[in-house]
Image (tube, rainbow, N blue to C red):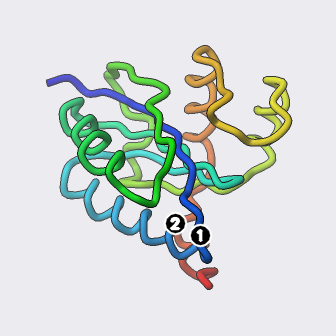
Amino acid sequence: MSNARILYVSKLYDCDNPKNDLFDILTEAVRFNSLNSICGVLYYGNGYFVQCLEGKRDKIENLFYEKILKDSRHKNCELMYSEDISENLFSRWNMKYAIIHKDIIDFFSEHKIDEFNPYTLSASAIPQFIELLAKQSDSYYTLDTNRA
């Protein structure tokens, strides 16, 4: 089975404390992904999730269709991108967490998108966006120490 990369977007369901849910999602992802040889990045901003997953195609597709789509913390979940890969961009992280950063705001501005809304990314912009996410620092531990 070949290795693949997918990117999906979703909205966080309405909740009182999104930081706690975000931390829980990240913690679950790190645990699950480490057991299943999956790596990737999660980006959260303006109430939107963007997650890029890499690993064996059957494992990441099963994760997406059997777990993520059924997770009540996500709504309007949509697979935006899928490709076969020979090399992982996120191999250092079972689940890296990228925070809002000037580079990402600038990227959306350059693509004529006024605010961060990943549903508006064009198919041609997604690979560039994934490369940008790969360059961002991991902020998982920052989120942990700032939990409310």
Crowd class of label 1 (few under 14; some 14 to 19; many from 20; radius 10 Å) = some
Asked which quadrant contains residue 135, the reply is: top right
- Residue closer to the observer: 124 or 120: 120
Q: Amino acid at mark 2?
A: Leu
Extreme-top residue of the structure: 124
In this rendering, the answer to whether 77 lies above or below 4 is below
Q: Residue 123: horizontal and vertical position, in percent?
A: 58, 17
Q: Is residue 139 placed above or below 11 in the rendered structure?
A: below
Query: Residue 77, image x and y in percent?
Result: 47, 41
Q: Label 2, on which residue?
A: 22
Q: Residue furthest left?
A: 1
Question: Which residue is painted at 26% across and 27% down in the image?
Answer: 3
Q: Quadrant of residue 110?
A: top right
- Comparing marks 2 and 1, which lies closer to the viewer? 1
Q: How many marks?
A: 2
Image quadrant holding the C terminus, namely: bottom right
Camera-side residue of 15 and 86: 15
Spatial CA distance of label 2 from label 1 is 6 Å
Contact between labelled residues 1 and 2, with CB atoms less than 8 Å apart: yes
Q: Is residue 107 left or right of residue 53?
A: right
* Farthest bottom residue in view: 148
Q: Quadrant of residue 105?
A: top right
Specify the quadrant that holds the N terminus.
top left
Q: Which mark is residue 93?
A: none
Q: Which residue is mark 1?
A: 18
Q: Secondary structure at mark 2?
A: helix
**In front of the other: 144 or 65:** 65
Q: Residue at x 48, y 48 (%)?
A: 41
Crowd class of label 2 (few under 14; some 14 to 19; many from 20; radius 10 Å): many
Q: What is the x, y in percent for residue 53?
A: 38, 40
Amino acid type at image mark 1: Pro
Give the secondary structure at mark 1: helix
